[in-house]
Image (cartoon, rainbow, N blue to C red):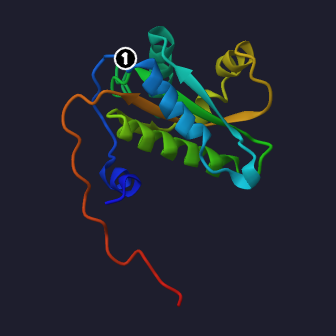
Amino acid sequence: MNEVIKAIKERRSCRKFKPDMPKREDIDAVIEAGLYAASGRGGQAPIILAVTNKELRDKFSRDNCRIGGWQEGFDPFYGAPVILVVLADKERPTYVYDGALTLGNMMLAAHSLGLGSIWIHRAREEFGEDEYKKLLADLGVEGDYEGIGHCAIGYADGEIPPAAPRRDGRVFYAE
């Protein structure tokens, strides 16, 4: 079977990660895969914020938990040591779709490198808050960016379950 199609069929969301930090070259490879995602008119609207600092990662976790309405102490990133936040330039008409493709590419790349991944929401809400806007400004990010999602990555702690059977009746040919 084609390796890309095999990765698509095998990749699953990971909900339990080991605390071990992935190798920097693997993190960079996942990011690069995201940067090569298709984008409307080749506009390359998404940017990626790679959070590898544990203190900042834990702040993202606490704030994401608060925004999501979970009980204090829950980790919405399931212990993943790396959070790759995808944001996109709101001036581009396809920015949400472009960001979604970026996240998809990164999850497939992580799988291909033996890493677990999961897409976590609430980046839009986080980066609507002043302190996260300030974080972007402090990093030199200029423009009007909206958070699209988080790609949490790391080494899976346990087996990743197989895919559920695909539902029938979801493909229609207009021949």
Q: Nearer the viewer, residue 50 or 130?
A: 50
Which quadrant of the figure has residue 99?
top right
Q: In this rendering, would 128 be left or right of 43? A: left
Q: Nearer the viewer, residue 160 or 167?
A: 160
* Secondary element at tag 1: loop
Q: Nearer the viewer, residue 164 or 10?
A: 10
Q: In this rendering, would 12 be left or right of 104? A: left
Kindly tell me whether residue 76 is visible in this rendering: no
Which quadrant of the figure has residue 79?
top left
- Quadrant placement of the N terminus: bottom left
Q: Nearer the viewer, residue 77 or 5?
A: 5
Residue 36's x, y, as percent?
Answer: 60, 43
Few, some or many residues within 10 Å of mark 1 (<14, 14–19, 20+)? some
Of all residues, the one furthest to the top in this rendering is: 55
Which quadrant of the figure has residue 156?
top left
Q: In this rendering, would 32 be left or right of 87? A: left
Of all residues, the one furthest to the bottom in this rendering is: 175
At x 34%, y 47%, the residue is 11
Residue 107's x, y, as percent?
Answer: 44, 41
- Residue position marked by numbered label 1 in the rendering: 21
Residue 138's x, y, as percent?
Answer: 72, 12
* Image: 56 above or below 159: above
At x 36%, y 52%, the residue is 3
